[in-house]
């Protein structure tokens, strides 16, 4: 039964379910399995914290996702199709488990993040780019 995103357990379900899809995905899975040696014991708590900050106003995330993705782009060219697939999988995960205003908020935030990352990635390829 679908419900609203209200608690840390909801964020954990969202993030865990999303990464189950990502790791099997033909378009972006390789980034997580081949390009970057991810320590899942470190990565998953960061993702929980990030989404708790985004959707539950926890303000527990202390990282910089833009710097992380710009560094990743230097290892593998991140393209619009990668972000489109990320959004698709994230939206599918949201819709499979949840309903309500936080779902709409999450989708809006994902759209904005993807647009900003693509813009910054494009800027990072220009001479004189400063993070």
Image (cartoon, helix red, strand yellow):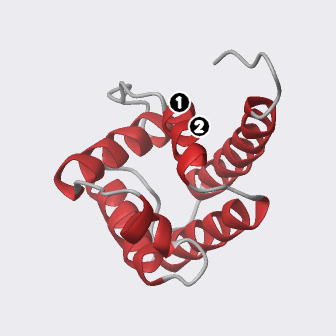
Q: Nearer the viewer, residue 8 or 110?
A: 110
> On the picture, is 69 further left or further right than 9?
right
- The crowding category of the residue bearing disc 2, from other C-alpha atoms within 10 Å (few below 14, some 14 to 19, many at least 20), is many
Label disc, if present, on residue 70 of the rendered structure: 2
In the rendering, at what x and y percent does residue 96 appear?
Answer: 51, 79
Which of 9/36 is in front? 36
Percent position of residue 119, x then y = 80, 37
Q: Quadrant of the N terminus?
A: bottom left
Relative placement, left or right, of 77 versus 15 is: right
**Badge 1 vs badge 2, beta-carbon distance below 8 Å:** yes
Q: Name the residue tied to disc 1.
A: 67
Q: Quadrant of residue 21?
A: bottom left
Q: Position of residue 37 (x, y in %)?
A: 31, 57
- Of residue 96 and residue 130, the one placed in the foreground of this image is 130
Q: Which residue is more in the foreground, 58 or 128? A: 128
Q: Residue at x 59, y 37 (%)?
A: 70
Q: Residue at x 67, y 55 (%)?
A: 78
Image location of residue 8, percent across then percent down: 28, 49
- Which quadrant: the C terminus? top right
Give SS at disc 2. Answer: helix
Seen in the picture, residue 16 relative to 46 is either above or below; the reply is below
Judged from this view, the residue extending furthest toward the left is: 41
Badge 1 crowding class, 10 Å Cα cut-off, few under 14, some 14 to 19, many 20 or more, is few
Marks 1/2: CA distance? 5 Å
Q: Which mark is residue 119?
A: none
State left or right for residue 81 relative to residue 23: right
Q: Secondary structure at mark 1?
A: helix
Give the residue drawn at x 57%, y 33%.
66
- Relative to 84, does residue 38 appear above or below in the rendering? above
- The relative height of residue 42 versus residue 116 in the rendered view (above or below) is below
């Amino acid at each position: 039964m679908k419900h609203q995103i209200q608690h840390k357990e909801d964020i954990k379900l969202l993030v865990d379910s999303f990464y189950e899809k990502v790791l099997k995905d033909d378009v972006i899975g390789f980034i997580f399995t081949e390009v970057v040696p991810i320590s899942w014991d470190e990565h998953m708590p960061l993702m929980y914290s990030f989404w708790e900050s985004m959707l539950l106003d926890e303000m527990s995330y202390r990282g910089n996702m833009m710097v992380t993705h710009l560094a990743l782009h230097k290892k593998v060219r991140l393209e619009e199709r990668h972000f489109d697939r990320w959004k698709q999988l994230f939206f599918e995960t949201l819709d499979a488990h949840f309903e309500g205003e936080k779902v709409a908020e999450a989708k809006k935030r994902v759209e904005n993040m993807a647009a900003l990352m693509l813009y910054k990635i494009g800027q990072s390829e220009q001479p004189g780019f400063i993070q």
